[in-house]
Image (cartoon, rainbow, N blue to C red):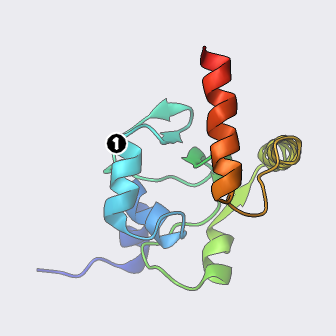
Amino acid sequence: MTKKSSTEASANIRLDKWLWAARFFKTRALARTMIENGKVKYNGQRCKPSRNVELDALLTITQGHDAKEVQVLKLSDQRRGAPEAQLLYSETQESLNKRTKEAELRKLQHSLNPHPDSKPDKKQRRQLIQVKQKNHS
């Protein structure tokens, strides 16, 4: 068996491995699951975890409430520190604007629907139950 040269090895990097190396997901298995569930799109289309990543590809990654659009700048199959991992991609300005706008909307919604500071005590629970029973009757 012969070893692959670094340029040959970097040309064929799987999508799940690149996402793991770029620190979008904690494990390759998690990256693979997210790709299979359609949470990651490669150039706007669903793909397989074994898809080879190319430079300048546009990835759409959905995590929680946010969807990030990132452009692949470098290829790597080794997981390194966060500052080095951030050099592998750049998020589009459109995606950044959209995420900040959605975060502000979530904060606004949360402020309009505040939660009480503490749980109701026994007396307050009884009053709540009485109010609910009157509304249902």
Percent x, y of residue 108:
88, 44
| Nearer-the-camera pick, 12 or 85 | 85
Q: Residue at x 57, y 55 (%)?
A: 55
As drawn, is 110 to the left or to the right of 79? right
| Nearer-the-camera pick, 32 or 18 | 32
Q: Is residue 70 above or below residue 1?
A: above
Quadrant location, the C terminus? top right
The residue furthest bottom is 81
Quadrant location, the N terminus? bottom left
Q: Residue at x 34, y 50 (%)?
A: 33
As drawn, is 84 to the left or to the right of 90? left
The residue furthest left is 1
Q: Secondary structure at mark 1?
A: helix
Counting every numbered tag in the picture gives 1
As drawn, is 10 to the left or to the right of 64? left
- Label 1 sits on what residue type? Glu
Residue 85 visible from this viewpoint: yes
Residue 14 visible from this viewpoint: no
As drawn, is 25 to the left or to the right of 133? left
Binning the other alpha carbons within 10 Å of mark 1 as few (below 14), some (14 to 19) or many (20 upward) gives some
For mark 1, what is the residue? 36
| Nearer-the-camera pick, 126 or 27 | 126
Q: Residue at x 43, y 73 (%)?
A: 7
Q: Is residue 81 above or below residue 15?
A: below
The residue furthest top is 137
Percent x, y of residue 96:
81, 50
Percent x, y of residue 2:
17, 81
Q: Residue at x 45, y 70 (%)?
A: 26
Percent x, y of residue 106:
79, 44
